[in-house]
Image: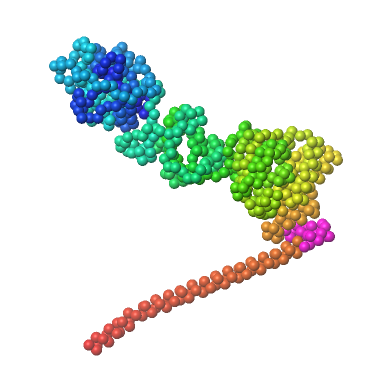
């Protein structure tokens, strides 16, 4: 019977050839005690051999356990050889029997193994009939002309099977993968014959190995592989992603979609070859979870981890690098094993300055790619928490930009504009993006309080974009938005006012289809919008943005009183006194009755004198310090010179004293 042993990491299996004892219709295993294998471990049905590449020797196979996957009554191998007698060689120099012969036919017709087999050994065969033949391990029994009896002589084949004990090692030539009929040769002097037979799809689960075991395999050490156990976390439950936790993490919180995660990892091929490791670079690897920045298996597995957790992730090619691979380190259609340790994860920062004021964590991804814009009608369900205490729970339908009129913080509206339909997210707000230093008495929110909102965007209807509106609609909407911005400004809601004035600028800045009276209205609206934006930026202490808005206003009207004055205030706030003084002087030159400009000019001159005094004092102290250090350095040099002179005079005094002592003696 053929004895089939699958080689992990390849599409071939090792097959023991020859006659095998046992009743018809049932596979049998040779008994070690019948041959020279007396006292060796009995072979178990079930298990596999482990194969690895060895330079110059081809595949080295270590027999872990034997599994009988298929069997067939066949004459002894010597009978096949005797029948064909002569052999021919293929172009690669490998011995190849002439066709047709049973061996090649067997290789072609060998069926795929069953997915699961009973792990039990066949009952031992009775002792062979006495034939007067000296059966020795590794040799065929009797002559090929002899007709096989009902119970053929099996001692030789039993010895062959006995040699396939745990720990025995076999070598296949490098051409074995191309020529399945090429025989395996034993390592260590044992006698048997094996062949490699194509296997359509592996049916034996691979071993999950720790990092230490992988390194031992690379160094040639023989270590028993662990069964590939783990939880199937692939969405299709196709065992494409298997996870084994090696060390439990801390806490209960896990990363969410969009989070920035920081990990250390090591990756191996199935043969134990390490192809990449962040530990070797001594630098943690970070990526945004769920955005396709890494292979699919990572996006699936890392979202289930906790901080401090170490796990092994086994991913099939379709969840890794697929049929293309990642040359030169990762071959096509490679199953990969990763060891991943999660150190930290952070939510997505939605602020322009990335100051952490608005952090979003996606609990459930939404549909499509469309998002609400300014003026869109949105329907949301929200819950607000302060120090884990629920203070707000509502379902609202409102226009984006008017949230503050419904007691919604500015930062929450910003987060809603980054959401997709059906998305469920958690939003964390710092005080500057929530209710600030004032708090919210209605909800009993104290000043400088951090807030957390859970938001579900049920639906939304986008507002018309600028390119979807005609000239009349733009002019009409600009007047409405200007009034709304003025209301927000008077209420101290400067961020909301900025959003309104920016809409006017975006609608009218590049519109050239107006004429006559409408053109003058557009000019006035644009100028007022830039001036109001500058005032809002000054209130928000965004001085660079205020200067930019003033410059745009002065492009429309170079002698505008408010534009010059507000730009001067912004320059004064950043201690740019020369530019501030120039702006205030120009205001007084054009509008001499402007008392505010006179007062600001006086403040500017006073601060200039104060700044000059500070600089004078600073430089004076600096010069005094330098002079003192110079004096100390000169004194040190003079002292060193005096010490050297005294040391030169010492030998003469010593000589004189010595002469005096000698004279007295």
- Please indicate whether residue 663 sits to the left or right of residue 499 in the image: left
The mark total stands at 0
State the residue lying farthest toward the bottom. 664
Q: Residue farthest to the right?
A: 517
Q: Quadrant of the C terminus?
A: bottom left
Where residue 392 sits: x, y (%)?
66, 44
Q: Nearer the viewer, residue 263 or 182?
A: 263
Q: Position of residue 193 (x, y in %)?
A: 26, 22
Which residue is found at the position 22% from the left and 30% from the top?
40
Magenta span covers which residues?
580-599
Residue 523 in picture, x, y percent from top left? 80, 44
> Is 482 placed above or below 617 here?
above
In the image: residue 381, left or right of residue 255: right
Residue at the image point whose x is 45% and y is 40% from the top? 340
Q: Residue at x 67, y 65 (%)?
A: 611
Q: Is residue 38 visible?
A: yes
Does residue 270 show up magenta in the picture? no
Q: Please, which residue is most extreme toward the left here?
A: 132
Can residue 262 be seen at all in this image of the molecule?
Answer: no
Q: Main secondary structure of the magenta part?
A: helix
**Relative to 31, residue 646 above or below:** below
Residue 479 is drawn in which quadrant?
top right
86 vs 18, nearest the viewer: 18
Q: Is 588 a magenta residue?
A: yes
Residue at the spot 55% in from the left edge and 41% down from the top edge:
259
Determine whether 140 is above or below 656 in the image.
above
Q: In the rendering, at what x and y percent does residue 423 appear?
A: 62, 36
Quadrant placement of the N terminus:
top left
Specify how the rendered protein is coloured.
rainbow
Q: In this rendering, is residue 16 above or below 625?
A: above
């Amino acid at each position: 019977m053929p004895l089939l042993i699958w080689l992990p990491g390849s599409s071939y299996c090792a097959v023991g050839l020859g006659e095998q004892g046992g009743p018809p219709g049932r596979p049998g295993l040779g008994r070690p005690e019948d041959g020279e294998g007396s006292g060796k471990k009995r072979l178990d049905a079930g298990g596999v051999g482990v194969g690895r590449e060895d330079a110059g020797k081809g595949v080295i196979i270590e027999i872990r356990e034997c599994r009988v996957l298929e069997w067939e009554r066949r004459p002894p191998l010597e009978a096949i050889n005797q029948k064909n007698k002569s052999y021919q060689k293929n172009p690669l120099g490998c011995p190849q029997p002439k066709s047709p012969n049973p061996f090649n036919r067997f290789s072609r017709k060998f069926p795929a193994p069953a997915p699961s087999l009973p792990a039990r050994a066949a009952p031992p065969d009775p002792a062979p009939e006495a034939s007067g033949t000296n059966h020795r391990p590794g040799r065929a029994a009797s002559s090929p002309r002899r007709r096989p009896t009902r119970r053929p002589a099996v001692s030789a084949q039993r010895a062959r099977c006995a040699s396939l004990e745990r720990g025995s090692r076999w070598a296949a030539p490098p051409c074995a993968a191309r020529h399945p009929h090429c025989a395996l040769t034993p390592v260590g002097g044992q006698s048997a014959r094996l062949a490699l037979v194509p296997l359509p799809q592996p049916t034996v689960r691979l071993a999950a190995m720790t990092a230490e075991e992988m390194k031992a395999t690379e160094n040639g050490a023989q270590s028993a592989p662990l069964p590939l156990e783990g939880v199937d976390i692939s969405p299709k439950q196709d065992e494409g992603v298997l996870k084994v936790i090696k060390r439990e993490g801390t806490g209960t919180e896990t990363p969410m979609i969009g989070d920035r995660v920081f990990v250390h990892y090591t990756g191996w091929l199935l043969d134990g070859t390490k192809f990449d490791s962040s530990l070797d670079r001594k630098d943690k690897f970070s990526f945004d979870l769920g955005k396709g920045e890494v292979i699919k298996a990572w996006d699936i597995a890392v979202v289930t981890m906790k901080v401090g957790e170490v796990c092994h992730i086994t991913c099939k090619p379709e969840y890794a690098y697929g049929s293309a691979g990642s040359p030169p380190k990762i071959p096509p259609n490679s199953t990969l094993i990763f060891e991943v340790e999660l150190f930290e994860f952070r939510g997505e920062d939605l602020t322009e300055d990335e100051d952490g004021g608005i952090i979003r964590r996606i609990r459930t991804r939404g549909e499509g790619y469309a998002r609400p814009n300014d003026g869109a009608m949105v329907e949301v369900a929200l819950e607000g928490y302060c120090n884990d205490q629920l203070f707000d729970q509502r379902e609202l339908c409102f226009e984006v930009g008017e949230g503050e009129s419904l007691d919604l913080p500015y930062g929450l509206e910003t987060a809603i504009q980054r959401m997709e339909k059906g998305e469920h997210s958690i939003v964390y707000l710092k005080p500057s993006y929530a209710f600030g230093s004032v708090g919210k008495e209605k909800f009993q929110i104290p000043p400088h309080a951090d807030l957390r909102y859970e938001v579900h965007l049920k639906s939304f209807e986008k507002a018309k974009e600028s390119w979807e509106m005609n000239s009349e609609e733009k002019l009409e909407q600009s007047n409405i938005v200007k009034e709304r911005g003025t209301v927000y400004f008077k209420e101290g809601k400067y961020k909301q006012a900025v959003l309104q004035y920016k809409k006017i600028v975006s609608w009218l800045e590049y519109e050239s289809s107006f004429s006559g009276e409408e053109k003058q209205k557009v000019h006035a609206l644009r100028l007022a919008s830039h001036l109001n934006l500058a005032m809002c930026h000054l209130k928000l202490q965004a001085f660079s943005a205020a200067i930019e808005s003033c410059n745009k206003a002065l492009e429309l009207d170079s002698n505008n009183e408010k534009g010059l004055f507000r730009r001067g205030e912004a320059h004064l706030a950043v201690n740019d006194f020369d530019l501030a003084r120039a702006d205030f002087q120009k205001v007084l030159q054009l509008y001499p009755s402007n008392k505010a400009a006179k007062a600001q000019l006086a403040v500017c001159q006073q601060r200039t004198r104060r700044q000059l005094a500070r600089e004078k004092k600073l430089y004076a102290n600096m010069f005094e310090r330098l002079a003192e250090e110079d004096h100390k350095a000169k004194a040190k040099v003079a002292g060193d010179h005096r010490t050297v002179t005294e040391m030169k005079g010492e030998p003469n005094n010593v000589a004189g004293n010595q002469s005096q002592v000698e004279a007295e003696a």
